[in-house]
Image (spheres, helix red, strand yellow):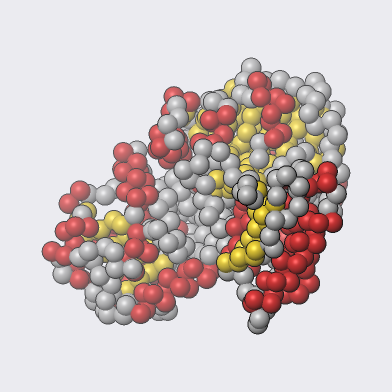
Amino acid sequence: MPVASEFETWAEAPAANELRLIPIGGLGEFGMNALVVHSARSLFLVDCGQLFPSDDQPGIDSIVPDFAYLEPFADRLQAVLLTHGHEDHLGALPYFLRRWPVPVYGTAFTLGLLEGKLREHGLDTGLLHVVTDYGRVKVGDGEIEAEWIPVTHSIPDACALALHTPQGVLVHSGDFKLDPEPLDGRHTGIERLQALGDAGVRLLMADSTNVGRPGRSPSEAVCREGLEAAFEQTKGRLFITTFSSNIHRLQTVVDLAYEFRRQVVLLGRSLDRNLTLARSLKRLDLPDDLLVDVKDAHLFRKNELVVLCTGSQGEPMSGLARLLRREVKGLPMEPGDRLVVSARAIPGNEVAISRMLDAAERLGAETSNDGLGPVHASGHGSREELADLIRAVRPSQMVPVHGTYRNLRAHSALAASLGWPPERISLLDGGLCLRLFLDGRVDMPGAVPVGKCFVHEGVDHMVDARVVQDRLILQEDGVVFATLLVDPQTGELAATPTILSRGFVMLSDDEAYAELLAGVARKAYEEAPMVVRNNGEAIRDTLRLALRRIIRKTTQTRPLVIPVILEAPAS
C-alpha cells in the first residue's frame, strides 16, 4: 500500500454528519487489534489488544498501540467494547485504562479474564460491565447502540458486534468461524446477521486471518479423534500443550482423561487461572477428583497421568519449558512418554517450537502426530466461511480487518469475486481513517498518528523505540566506548582518547585498530568548533558520527558507539 497522506484536520472533532473508523492496530499485522469509532457525539474503542514481541525486539514484554489520536479528545472518551478475551484483543487494556478509566463492556468469560489482569495492575475492576449474547448497550449519550452477537471461536463467549449508528448499521465480525458442531452448543448467530443484512448493513469489518485457506475450517469436534488416539497409543505419561484460553480443547482432554482413567496435572499459571474461571462460569466440567497437584504426580504410575501444559509456542517461562529443563520435581519426561502440541504455530514462533520439540525428543518422548488424526482446529473461519458471512450480511461497504496486508488484499479479492465492486471495498491500513456520512458518502481523508509503544514489565513508563533499537545493535554488533579526557581550563584534550569495546569484533590487529579509532576521535574533537565543544550533547553527537562512519567503512558493522567525555583532574 502506498504511504497514505496525512489527515491534516484529524485533531478537530468530527462534523455532525460524520463517523470516523480508525484502526490504530490490527491491520497490516497479526495482533494489537484496536479500532476507534468516533462521531461528533460518540468516541469509543472496539477491542484494545497487545502484540507479542519478536526476536528483533529484545527485552520487551509487550507491545501496545500508540493512542495519540485520542489525546485531543481525552475528555470525550466513553467506553471500550470487547469482542472476546484473547490477548491480541484486550491485552493492552491495563495500560489504556490507567490513562482513560472508562467503562468496558464484554461477555462474562471475556471480562473474567480481564478482571484478573486489572487486579494484577491495581486497577479498578468496577469499570467492567457484563453483556449477554444478543445484549445491547447504548454507548455514551445513546447516539450509538452496540449489540453483541455470538460467534464460535477458540475461546468461550466470543462475539461479533453490530453498531447501530445514525450512519447505518456497522458489523464487526471479531474473530469467528462457522462451526456446525460447537462443543458448548453455542452457534454463531448467523440468523441475526442475516436479519441485519435484510434490513440493510452499511459496512462490514470482517476477520481476514484464514482467507488464504480454501474451504472451511474443521469443527472443534474433530480434535477428539486425534487426541483420543494419543491417549490410546501412549504407554507412559501423556503431555499435552495448547492455548490456555481454549477451554473447549481443554474440555476434550478432561473428558478423555476421565474415560481413560488418567489423572490430570496442570502446569502453568494461566491454565490454573483460566480453568478456575471457566469452572466458576460453568464453561467447563472438571471433577475435583480428576485433578492431581504437581507435587503428588510422583505417586502415580506413568500411564495414570495426563499433563496439561502451557508453552505451545515455545515460551521460555512456560510450564512445558520448565519441565523440559527438568525444573519440575517428580515429573520427568522420559522414553515412553508423548508430547502432543494441540495448537498452531503463531507466525514467528516456528523456531522456538522446533527447539521445544527437539528438547522433548532428547528426553526420549515421542513428538510426532503422524497416525493420530487431527489434534488442532483453527478458531478462524476459512475462505468459504468468510464468503458466507459476506453473503449473509450483504453490506454496502466491505472492509477486511485482522491480518497482514496480503490477507486484507486477498479478502478484498474474495469480496470482489462475490460481486462487490471496487468502490464498495475499502482497503485500510493502520491509522488510515475511513469516514461515513449521513448522505451515503464514504471517503478516506488520510492517516492519523499511530505507532507502537513498548512495555518492559517493572518499568512504570513506556520504553522508547530507540532503546529497543540500541538493544538490537548490542545483540548484533556490540558496543564501542570512546573516552576523551579534556582539560577544563583550555578545552583541549589532556590525553590520547581510549577505546574499549564489548561484543564488537575488531580487525585482526586489535591494538592497531583501536589506535585508528582513537585518532579519528581526536581529529573529530580538535576540528569541532568551540561552540560545539562547549555543548556536551553536540560534541558527543559529532564524535559518535565520526566513529560510526569509520567503523562502518572498515568493518561493515554498526555497533553502538558511546562517547564519554571526562574532565582531567587539576594538576
Residue at horizontal 50 percent and vertical 42 percent from the top: 459
The quarter in which the N terminus is drawn is bottom right
Q: Position of residue 500 (x, y in %)?
A: 61, 65
Residue 499 or residue 289, whichever sits in front: 499
Q: Is residue 233 above or below residue 419?
A: below
Q: Residue lying farthest front?
A: 571
Residue 420: percent from the left, percent from the top?
80, 50
Q: Is residue 51 left or right of residue 74?
A: left
Q: Is residue 417 visible?
A: no
Q: How many marks?
A: 0
User: Is residue 65 among the parts visible in the rendering?
Assistant: yes
Left or right of 128, for residue 160: right
Considering every residue shown, the one lying at the far top of the view is 141
Image position, residue 153 (x, y; %): 50, 50
As drawn, the residue found furthest toward the left would be: 299
Using the rendered view, name the quadrant where residue 328 is placed.
Answer: bottom left
Q: Nearer the viewer, residue 416 or 563?
A: 563
Q: Residue at x 64, y 65 (%)?
A: 499
Residue drawn at (45%, 54%), measured in percent from left and top? Answer: 181
Q: Which residue is nearer to you in this view: 190 or 177? A: 177
Residue 201 spot, x, y in % from top left: 71, 36
Q: Of 302 and 383, which appears nearest the observer?
A: 302
Quadrant of the image occupied by residue 546: bottom right
Q: Image height check: is 413 above or below 160?
A: below
